[in-house]
Amino acid sequence: MPLLRSKKNTGRDAEKRAAKWLTGQGLSIVERNFHCRQGEIDLILLDQETLVFTEVRWRKHQSYGGALASVDQHKQRRLINAAQHFLARHPEHHHRPCRFDVLGMEPDSQQAVLYQWIQNAFYSE
């Protein structure tokens, strides 16, 4: 898969790559691009019995900060609110433990993609 080029498609392409990479790590996809009034969650996956709400971040340059740095408190709050909304809509997942991950992606010097997977990147209060 060629590296991401078009700004318009960058987010969509990054999320496709992320989904493929995470399923390769043993997770299974529950939902992609969950939208609600409270926010959006890029990927919702299962890691065994744990429901994983994942924010995907493509970084063209490290000079702008890493993936975790780009998910500030405001973004975390929106993700938490969206996750609560997802759980309200999907009671079949109420029994599952949940976590919030961030998957950072960036090109390396050979134009391959480097992945930085931060599990339990932040917690709901």
Image (tube, rainbow, N blue to C red):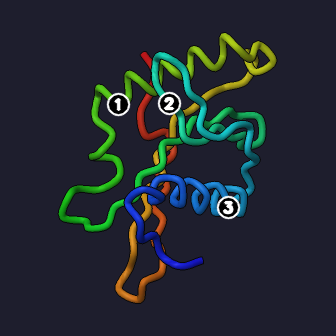
Q: Which residue is mark 2?
A: 40
The quarter of the rendered structure image containing the C terminus is: top left
> Is the residue marked by circle 1 packed among few (<14), some (14-19), or many (20+) residues within 10 Å?
some
Cα–Cα gap, marks 1 and 2: 10 Å
Q: Which residue is mark 1?
A: 75
Q: Secondary structure at mark 3?
A: helix
- Say which amino acid is labelled 3: Lys
Name which residue lies at 41% across and 66% down.
6
Q: Secondary structure at mark 2?
A: strand
- Say which amino acid is labelled 2: Glu
Name which residue lies at 74% across and 56% down.
26
Write down the quadrant of residue 123 in the picture. Answer: top left
In this rendered view, identify the residue nearer to me: 86 or 13: 13
Write down the quadrant of residue 110 in the picture. Answer: bottom left
Name which residue lies at 67% across and 32% down.
51
Q: Which residue is mark 3?
A: 20
- Say which amino acid is labelled 1: Lys
> Is the residue marked by circle 3 packed among few (<14), some (14-19), or many (20+) residues within 10 Å?
some
Of the numbered discs 3 and 2, the one sitting upstream in the chain is: 3
The nearer-to-camera label among 1 and 2 is 2
- Residue at the far left in the pictured view: 63
The nearer-to-camera label among 3 and 2 is 2
